[in-house]
Amino acid sequence: MAKPLKLDPDRLLPAEDRTRAIARELYREVAELPIISPHGHTDASWFSTNANWSNATELLLSPDHYIYRMLYSQGVSLDALCVPSKAGMPATDPRAAWRTFAEHLYLFRGTPSAMWLGHVFGEVFGFDVALDGETADFYYDTINAKLASDDFRPRALFDRFNIEFLATTEGPQDDLSAHHAVQASGWPGRVVTTYRPDAVIDVEHEQFHGALKIFAEKTGEDVYSWDGYLAAHAKRRTDFRAAGATATDHGHPTARTANLSKAEAAALFAKILGSDWTPADAELFRAQMLTEMAAMSVEDGMVMQIHPGSFRNHNGGLFASHGRDKGADIPMATEYVHGLKPLLDRFGTSTALSIILFTLDETVYSRELAPLAGHYPCLKLGPAWWFHDSPEGMRRFREQVTETAGFYNTVGFNDDTRAFLSIPARHDVARRIDCGFLAQLVAEGRLLDWEAAELAFELTNGLVRKAYKLDRA
Amino acid sequence: MAKPLKLDPDRLLPAEDRTRAIARELYREVAELPIISPHGHTDASWFSTNANWSNATELLLSPDHYIYRMLYSQGVSLDALCVPSKAGMPATDPRAAWRTFAEHLYLFRGTPSAMWLGHVFGEVFGFDVALDGETADFYYDTINAKLASDDFRPRALFDRFNIEFLATTEGPQDDLSAHHAVQASGWPGRVVTTYRPDAVIDVEHEQFHGALKIFAEKTGEDVYSWDGYLAAHAKRRTDFRAAGATATDHGHPTARTANLSKAEAAALFAKILGSDWTPADAELFRAQMLTEMAAMSVEDGMVMQIHPGSFRNHNGGLFASHGRDKGADIPMATEYVHGLKPLLDRFGTSTALSIILFTLDETVYSRELAPLAGHYPCLKLGPAWWFHDSPEGMRRFREQVTETAGFYNTVGFNDDTRAFLSIPARHDVARRIDCGFLAQLVAEGRLLDWEAAELAFELTNGLVRKAYKLDRA
Amino acid sequence: MAKPLKLDPDRLLPAEDRTRAIARELYREVAELPIISPHGHTDASWFSTNANWSNATELLLSPDHYIYRMLYSQGVSLDALCVPSKAGMPATDPRAAWRTFAEHLYLFRGTPSAMWLGHVFGEVFGFDVALDGETADFYYDTINAKLASDDFRPRALFDRFNIEFLATTEGPQDDLSAHHAVQASGWPGRVVTTYRPDAVIDVEHEQFHGALKIFAEKTGEDVYSWDGYLAAHAKRRTDFRAAGATATDHGHPTARTANLSKAEAAALFAKILGSDWTPADAELFRAQMLTEMAAMSVEDGMVMQIHPGSFRNHNGGLFASHGRDKGADIPMATEYVHGLKPLLDRFGTSTALSIILFTLDETVYSRELAPLAGHYPCLKLGPAWWFHDSPEGMRRFREQVTETAGFYNTVGFNDDTRAFLSIPARHDVARRIDCGFLAQLVAEGRLLDWEAAELAFELTNGLVRKAYKLDRA
């Protein structure tokens, strides 16, 4: 007999009665607030074309490395899960892949993916039985039927999810046509882009030279000279702002910054364009570019997001067969105190600049990030990120950051996801965990109830709006 | 008046009522399951000879650096505790040493040693008064009398402890005679060995050259040539498998691996056999040997355990006077992401290989180990180890590992102990903490009760059996 | 209408009923014990002159970088807060600065500063309305009036706070006249100094050469020769002991130690006195001096405190305009295992030496510090420090340290503050958190109630007295 699927209305709130009662009150006031998603990886063309998605496997499984990495780690092949390789989509029947997924769903017990999937299945699709091997076909057919309906087109879900603001992420090579189409369509949904120039900054990125070529075409600048390269960035930042962007994003291996003289920077740029650069040159150039981007942000007001610390494509064999973004990015120890100093020595006392720092290395929460954000006017802390975007991860973030940085040097939640259907689930988890944390402070006499209520609103809506300059844009 | 000794039947379960009730249910189902101890340091000759142990001090105090290090840290001399130095056993009366221990038992308050000792005293020896200065002699006499009885011989305790599987650890120099004697004895207890070749791999180990000589004798191979050296390993691995081993164990200072060409490896081996190697050479050779051991594991199916990160014999003065394993091993920061990459680039996509990773550096739980194990088919995570094999340490392990790696990329508990009498205590602590962790997930709506029950069994019995290939061996 | 200010009598005790009841019992027994403050930065002249403080802003805001850094991080200028720059005190009206502070008090929600300020306002000044923009003037006037009264003179507060021992910190340049005046005054309060020689040890300190000159004058030694320099230290240590000091304090960037030969040390000293030293030389000299100080401590019995890991004056712009100690010190990753080994190889087995280790890098609690302190007789662990001197920070300290080091290798609490009025608040927070931690151990069956009661006393009074040798001095 199929097992029931039923979401606990008090899920993720603290177990202790008195604390739970406080948390429940706080959550009730923020549960239905609109979603502001200032950083993520959804596809703008979903909202420009508003086309129906095809099927459960292609929407929920094949593209989501959060999901298939777990089955892969237990010996299931990516082919069996319809994950495309460099040779294209495997011949696997999508329904068979869905069954394999369903049979392995138990692997996610205790993980945030289990919570997100439960929310998507129960709240978005309305299932009341759990997914497992027995119900796999029922799920597959039901989901596909719903995905083919008007109610499950991207714009309908955007409205149903009560999304007020959704940022995507594009590179300097992108023509932003999907965003322009959204803007021209008359649809009132606010879907904007974010400027993420990594591909034209990181010479170790396999697409660097190709990206640079498109960068030149899109801007008409001589991107092979230092001045032209910087001018091209400035032009594209203007393009992105015109498409609604309020922020840039930088996914470097480290948080290192540099502050070279113009002549030194130009010479370094010339070197990395050639063939005799070293990894140290590549790193120094990335470091210098963070400072150049900060200088442009001081001028144009774009908020900088720095997302360092991922060892990309760690699995050499898998990278060779399947390429990037296949669940093989592994966090590394990341240093901020020395790394950010050159940039901060130049702009640290500025209140015109706003930098949001993220980390995959939780050891820096209390040691480096909270003290930095608790001092520098230009620094704010992004929420628990990626592997740490989870109940325990979010709790550790609040416990380790709040006492030094306070709540007001943080920026609310962002979901950072390409799994559009899970966006409400992710924001709901964050709201529940934040309300639970605030409730604990109240229960322990560390915060008053009305302060907690104000903070619950700030953590859900106020801080993100201010940090990403949503009301000025 | 003597203070009572009474174990709280709910000890280590969460304090909050509802969570505790859930935990109690879970624990009830796993409390009496047989003990599987796949990694430890008991002495196989105990089970081959089945001789009585001598006295309380020689069994429980002199050999247990978990215990005497704490008294040493407070200024008690090792001589006063009957800890042998290089000059042999000190002249201290074992009874006097026991008294000194008893008078300092308060130092262990809040430590897992206090819990283990309480269990050993209360459950194994049946004391109902606490050990302190007043009861020291009563304890000493009672324990000695019991140790002299048939009920306290090693095999009787093995049965009473309900041990299903017990692995010891031996080096390539070992003739495995104790294991052969156990096997030949007709006694049905399953006591097996583990292949730990550190002494013939680590040229910085003070026994390296002596061990290598015995390695040659035991195998008849020319262990001073690269091919002969590898062949000797292969032979000894076969010997160890014949003595029941399912696993190897590698206690290196770091988790570094290497993937040299055969010529490079042979040249490096020749160098470390000479006298002009550097610490970097020693490290590179250890790194290369992890990859060589992985290659052999792919062939013979032995599970690899990697236990890195201990600075051995940190106290120079003590090492000079007392030698190794005297409680002066101190953990170091340990890096896995870059360290393991050469091995993983060679074998990372293999499902034939199984590597169990341990750490003394908790900062890598969420940052490195869980993401690695949540991706690579060949990687699993060993339980909280050594200093972290404790209630808080185990909780941190579950909290920091589960959300990214899931439960199914972990391998259950292992006690890693030479303190045989504490084995039930240690497994009991792990079962209680795991049930408490699962209960919290249930209480917070993150897991269903029947899922928690399945997981409690897996964490106690299922995962360890599979990870160490106990049913195939 | 003004919001009420009311301190929860159960604040910081665990929320769960049964645990809270245990904690309340424990706390009741230690709440009123005298304060022992063995490490801090109050001004001895307060107690020698016993003069009234001037006003709220100059006492509570301008000098307290714990406070004004938070407003600065949100864009409030230091000038607006009456924080002196190199050009002197800004022209801002102190009352206006106080108002600005009051209007931004919400920034501290969830931080220990909010708890300390609440205690100071409610308990020390007797306010029953909260500070905010509306009540700022009322607060300012009331505080100033009280500060002008006899009841709020330093000695009166010292008595009212029930302080039994208060250590300040002075450099080798200090003439200790304020301490001599306290001693000569007949006032029975025990206010003693601590020897902190950083300014004459750290050649990278901007005051190094000036400090060395005064060092020579104060001692009559040839401080520019290695022998004279060491003799000068010995002399000043004698002076400091005469002024009540029982301890030295060392605030180095790292925990590195060295053990050079006398000739090497003398040559290094000669080099750093010149102009061609490198940062590595400066670091090595600091490292060597920790070992030299340990050698002197073995002789004179002074307890060594090592406070490493702060990147001082990180904000280059602010350091240029405002100088040091302006809230811009940021913690760094700090290594102890290799760092301390040279010193420990020389003195590690000594029971004559006592070193108290602190850290700003919490990752070393369980990995390095607890194992080191749980082994070496000469090592003890200082309490959670600076950014971690907070409810969550203290809990992490106990959770991560206790299981390996035990309670008895720790040294009680110290407030490390220059904010004299907050001393009772800070000790009260520590007592509450410690009682809550002990209560949790009792509630989970990990500690007996009478053991917890003994430990509550030890953590409040017993351990600090022993660690700082207060009864021998």
Image (tube, coloured by chain):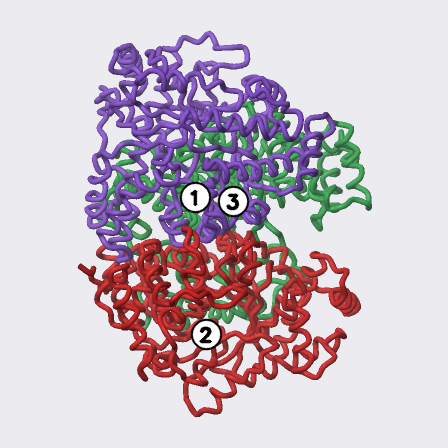
Chain colours: A green, B red, C purple
Dot 2 falls on which chain? B
Mark 1 crowdedness (10 Å alpha carbons): few <14, some 14-19, many ≥20: many
B133 left or right of B37 in image: left
Do circles 3 and 1 both sit on a common chain? no
On the image, the x and y values in percent for residue A259 come to 68, 30
Type of amino acid at the residue the image marks with label 3:
Gly
Decide which of C295, A171 is in the foreground and name it: C295
Type of amino acid at the residue the image marks with label 1:
Leu
Type of amino acid at the residue the image marks with label 2:
Thr
Classify residue B429 by image quadrant. bottom left
Dot 3 falls on which chain? A
The residue indicated by pointer 1 is C381
Q: Is residue C98 visible?
A: no
Element type at marker 3? loop
B86 left or right of B148 in image: right
**Disc 2 versus disc 1: distance between alpha carbons?**
33 Å
**Disc 2 versus disc 3: distance between alpha carbons?**
53 Å
On the image, the x and y values in percent for residue A108 come to 43, 62
The residue indicated by pointer 3 is A40
The residue indicated by pointer 2 is B42
Mark 2 or 3: in front is: 2
**Disc 3 versus disc 1: distance between alpha carbons?**
44 Å
Image point (48%, 88%), residue name: B183
Classify residue C201 by image quadrant. top right
* Image height of B11 relative to A222, above or below: below
Element type at marker 1? strand
The N terminus of chain B, quarter of image = bottom left
